[in-house]
Image: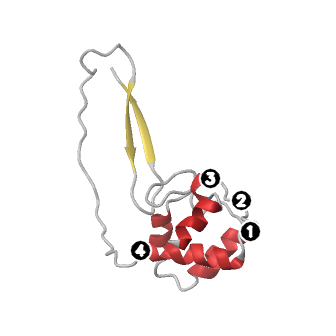
Amino acid sequence: PQAAKLIESKQCLACHQVDANSVGPSYLNVALRYRDDPNARPQLLKKLREGGAGAWGEIPMPAQAAVSDGEANEIIQAILGLSEGMAEARAKAEGTLVFPAAVAGSAAGGAWEIIAEAPLHTAAKMRIPAK
């Protein structure tokens, strides 16, 4: 589609991916956050024009001066369209992770790394030293 070529040509993929958080939020997370917001288009256009920080984490988004209003609206329409037809689901995950003290055949030390990620949430990472 035309929007995909536009997103690629404007270097948006340097910071964003369709369905995974990167430097910035995934396009799917943006679509889900704004899908019921009647002010989404003007808010996102302002974000593209002026840049911003804090809405998705600590890394600021720079202003995108090389993107015309027409191009910006096409990109925004494509991003917001990602949530069409998706049902909202809410769930809470609970449980216990049990790790062996060390992996067989590995050197002493090291750590277990656990990463959790869900739409509309910043990924969480935890390192647990191996015993």
Distance in Å between CA atoms under marks 1 and 3: 16 Å
Classify 10 Å Cα crowding around label 1: few (below 14), some (14-19), many (20 and above): few
- The reply, left or right, for residue 32 in relation to residue 57 is left
> Is label 4 in a helix, a strand or a loop?
helix
Classify 10 Å Cα crowding around label 3: few (below 14), some (14-19), many (20 and above): few
| Among the two numbered marks 4 and 1 on one chain, the one whose residue lies closer to the N terminus | 1
Instruction: Give the residue at mark 1.
Output: 50
Distance in Å between CA atoms under marks 2 and 3: 12 Å
Which residue type carries mark 3? Glu
Instruction: Give the residue at mark 2.
Output: 62
Residue 72's disc is none
The image shows residue 38 at horizontal and vertical percentages of 54, 86
Instruction: Give the residue at mark 4.
Output: 83
Q: Residue at x 50, y 57 (%)?
A: 17
| Among the two numbered marks 4 and 2 on one chain, the one whose residue lies closer to the N terminus | 2
Q: Can residue 15 be seen at all in this image of the molecule?
A: no
- The reply, left or right, for residue 121 in relation to residue 103 is right
Residue reaching furthest to the bottom: 38
Which residue type carries mark 4? Ser
The image shows residue 45 at horizontal and vertical percentages of 66, 76
Q: Residue at x 45, y 50 (%)?
A: 123
> Is label 2 in a helix, a strand or a loop?
loop
